[in-house]
Image: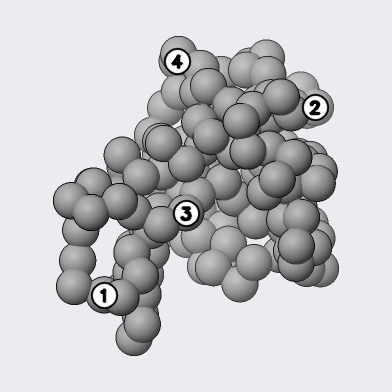
């Protein structure tokens, strides 16, 4: 990946779980901090961002379904770390998160869909710029 001390990636899932054509995002509440976040984590040596995001999501939320659509990705190369968020549209009825996933109960205590216009108060700060990007510059979610 990069030269930063910490490099990682995760996936922000977008969908319409209510069927009312309003975009929602799937967030998990981290077990330790209580912050609503996305599945993701640190890259292994030589791992590319998508590979990191895919691996971490499989461990934390369960196996990714067929039929996902990559909407965009945003990279945050900050002073002490390099983070990439991939935005993926889930197919209807995907079944994520699978609460029996390998690390779900270790990493997350809960997961829920939220309208992108009404995120929880304790949402990880790097989620907001991704949502703003989606709402202001497209592509439409």
- Label pair 2/4, CB-CB below 8 angstroms: no
**Mark carried by residue 18:** 2
- Label pair 3/1, CB-CB below 8 angstroms: no
Residue 66 seen in the current view: yes
**Mark carried by residue 83:** none
The answer to whether residue 101 is left or right of residue 56 is right
Q: 10 Å neighbourhood of mark 2: few (<14), some, or many (≥20)?
A: few
**Mark carried by residue 41:** 3
- Residue drawn at 41 percent across, 36 percent down: 55
Q: What residue sits right under mark 1 in the picture?
A: 4
Name the colouring of the figure: one colour
- Residue drawn at 34 percent across, 54 percent down: 43
Q: What residue sits right under mark 4 in the picture?
A: 67
Label 3 and label 2: CA atoms lie apart by 29 Å
- Label pair 1/2, CB-CB below 8 angstroms: no
Q: Secondary structure at mark 3?
A: strand
Q: Secondary structure at mark 2?
A: loop
| x and y, in percent, of residue 81 in the image | 36, 75
Residue 140 seen in the current view: no
Foreground pick, 105 / 30: 105
- Marks 1, 2: nearer the viewer: 1
């Amino acid at each position: 990946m990069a030269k930063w001390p910490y490099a990682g990636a995760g996936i922000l899932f977008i969908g319409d779980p209510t069927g009312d054509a309003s975009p929602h995002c799937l967030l998990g509440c981290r077990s330790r901090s209580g912050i609503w976040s996305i599945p993701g984590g640190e890259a292994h040596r030589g791992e590319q961002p998508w590979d990191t995001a895919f691996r971490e999501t499989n461990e934390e939320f369960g196996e990714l379904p067929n039929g996902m659509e990559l909407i965009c990705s945003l990279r945050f190369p900050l002073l002490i770390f390099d983070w990439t968020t991939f935005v993926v549209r889930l197919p209807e009825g995907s079944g994520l998160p699978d609460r029996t996933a390998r690390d779900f109960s270790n990493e997350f205590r809960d997961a829920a869909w939220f309208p992108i216009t009404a995120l929880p108060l304790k949402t990880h700060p790097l989620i907001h710029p991704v949502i703003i990007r989606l709402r202001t510059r497209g592509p439409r979610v």
